[in-house]
Amino acid sequence: REEGTMEMSLSSLSIGLELETWLPNVSALVPQRLRVVRSAADLFALVADVVSAKVSAMAPSCRAKSRLVSAEQLDWGRLWTSSGDASIRPTPMPLSRCDASPFPVELASNVMRFDEADVNNFCDVCAALRSPPLRAQTNESTGLHVHVGRHFDGGFFSVRELANVVAAYVRFEGVVNRRLLP
């Protein structure tokens, strides 16, 4: 232990993830849900519904807290949420795909723990994003942001604790890297 600090365990750590991506043809989602889309908020809700349905249809490999995705701000931190991100710039589509409607979207995770259920839920969300009709894409304007904190005990990190956070990430790095969009 360092003087004046308390050593933490992985159970006190929280992690939040932001997946920045873009969908090459958001209009492909509309037949899936037959709904009127009048605004960007309606589109984010549509994306949330499609991702929720796909993730919920997957057989969970372990007990997940929630497999739902929302577009509501009040769900931020509690559920995965879909929203906009002005920094995402979809790659222009070839002229042969003039019917395509690329749509930038960010999916932010709920406040998660470093445990198997949350890692598997993250992997399922990535798999849902890759699959039709979503077919999420990445480019130089997209990314994965990782936020690590001590949400569950309200403390702050010592130097040793920061080293432990990095070690925990390294433990799951292979799983994360295999699930990232190309």
Image (cartoon, helix red, strand yellow):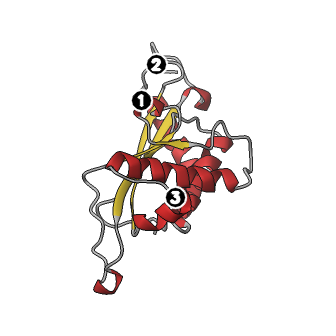
Camera-nearest residue between 150 and 40: 40
Residue 46: x and y, percent?
Answer: 47, 52
Furthest residue toward bottom: 96
For the point 56% across and 63% down, which residue is it? 178
Residue 11: x and y, percent?
Answer: 61, 29
Camera-nearest residue between 82 and 28: 28
- On residue 8, the disc is none
Residue identifier under label 2? 155
**182 relative to 67, above or below:** below
Residue identifier under label 1? 159
Where disc 1 sits, the SS reads: helix
Q: Is residue 108 shown left or right of residue 170?
A: left
**70 relative to 22, above or below:** above
* Front tag of 1 and 2: 2
Residue identifier under label 3? 34
| Label 1 neighbour load within 10 Å: few <14, some 14-19, many 20+ | few
For the point 35% across and 77% down, which residue is it? 99
For the point 46% across and 68% down, which residue is it? 28
| Label 2 neighbour load within 10 Å: few <14, some 14-19, many 20+ | some
For the point 61% across and 42% down, which residue is it? 118
Camera-nearest residue between 83 and 163: 83
Where disc 3 sits, the SS reads: loop
Residue 136: x and y, percent?
Answer: 45, 65
**75 relative to 120, above or below:** above
